Image (cartoon, rainbow, N blue to C red):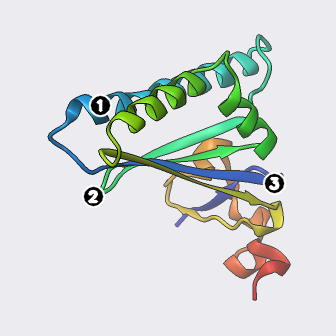
């Protein structure tokens, strides 16, 4: 079996964001929220590609994985820093701020119909441990690439470093 781990040696920000649908029959209320995130992810991916070509400033987005749960979609994003994440979120030049304003306006008119949530984790490089076996590549490994697991150690405890209890 082949074992790999994430290639990134730096600190990382893990940003979870999702929505909950309380009134599924009100597609007019949740659909705009549902389609806003794919537009933002596409914008961030275009930026990443432009940065690789040397044509744009790096927004700090490393990649994302979209999941679907019982209550709604959930996106796990990886960023270089909280500063870059917050800069993107508050920039009038990007897709997030208009979507955020639209959600807030709709939320005031129809409270409780659609919920949004997010969680931000600033993780030091020594606090990250990953394993991808037999070609599995998702999450941080998909966002930053993978390397042979021997680069960090064969055991999870070794890869995680001194932060293991």
Q: How far separated are the C-alphas under marks 2 and 1?
A: 16 Å
- Element type at marker 3? loop
For residue 139, side relative to residue 80 (left or right): left
Residue 31 is marked as: 1
For residue 69, side relative to residue 100 (left or right): left
Q: Residues within 10 Å of mark 1 (few under 14, many from 20)?
A: few
Q: How far separated are the C-alphas under marks 3 and 1?
A: 35 Å
Which quadrant holds the C terminus?
bottom right
- Element type at marker 1? helix
- In the image, what residue occupies the spot 75% across and 72% down? 159
Of pointers 3 and 1, the one earlier in the residue sequence: 3
Q: Position of residue 50 (x, y in %)?
A: 69, 16
Which residue sits furthest bottom?
165
Q: Position of residue 53 (x, y in %)?
A: 74, 14
Of pointers 2 and 3, the one earlier in the residue sequence: 3
- In the image, what residue occupies the spot 39% across and 31% down? 106
Q: How far separated are the C-alphas under marks 2 and 3?
A: 31 Å
For residue 143, side relative to residue 159 (left or right): left
Q: Nearer the viewer, residue 154 or 46?
A: 46
Q: Which residue is mark 2?
A: 70
Residue 11 is marked as: 3
Q: In the figure, 149 relative to 80: above or below? A: below
Corner quadrant of residue 163: bottom right
Q: Residues within 10 Å of mark 2 (few under 14, many from 20)?
A: few
């Amino acid at each position: 079996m082949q074992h790999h781990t994430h290639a990134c040696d730096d600190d990382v920000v893990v940003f979870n964001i999702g929505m909950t649908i309380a009134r599924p029959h009100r597609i007019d209320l949740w659909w705009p929220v549902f389609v806003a995130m794919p537009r933002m992810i596409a914008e961030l991916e275009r930026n990443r590609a432009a940065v690789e070509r040397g044509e744009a400033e790096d927004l700090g987005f490393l990649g994302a994985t979209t999941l679907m749960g019982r209550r709604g979609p959930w996106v796990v994003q990886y960023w270089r820093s909280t500063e870059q994440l917050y800069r993107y979120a508050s920039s009038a030049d990007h897709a997030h701020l208009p979507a955020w304003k639209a959600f807030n306006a709709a939320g005031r008119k129809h409270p409780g119909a659609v919920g949004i949530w997010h969680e931000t984790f600033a993780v030091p490089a020594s606090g990250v441990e990953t394993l991808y076996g037999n070609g599995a590549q998702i999450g941080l490994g998909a966002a930053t690439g993978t390397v042979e697991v021997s680069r960090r150690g064969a055991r999870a405890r070794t890869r995680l470093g001194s932060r293991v209890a």
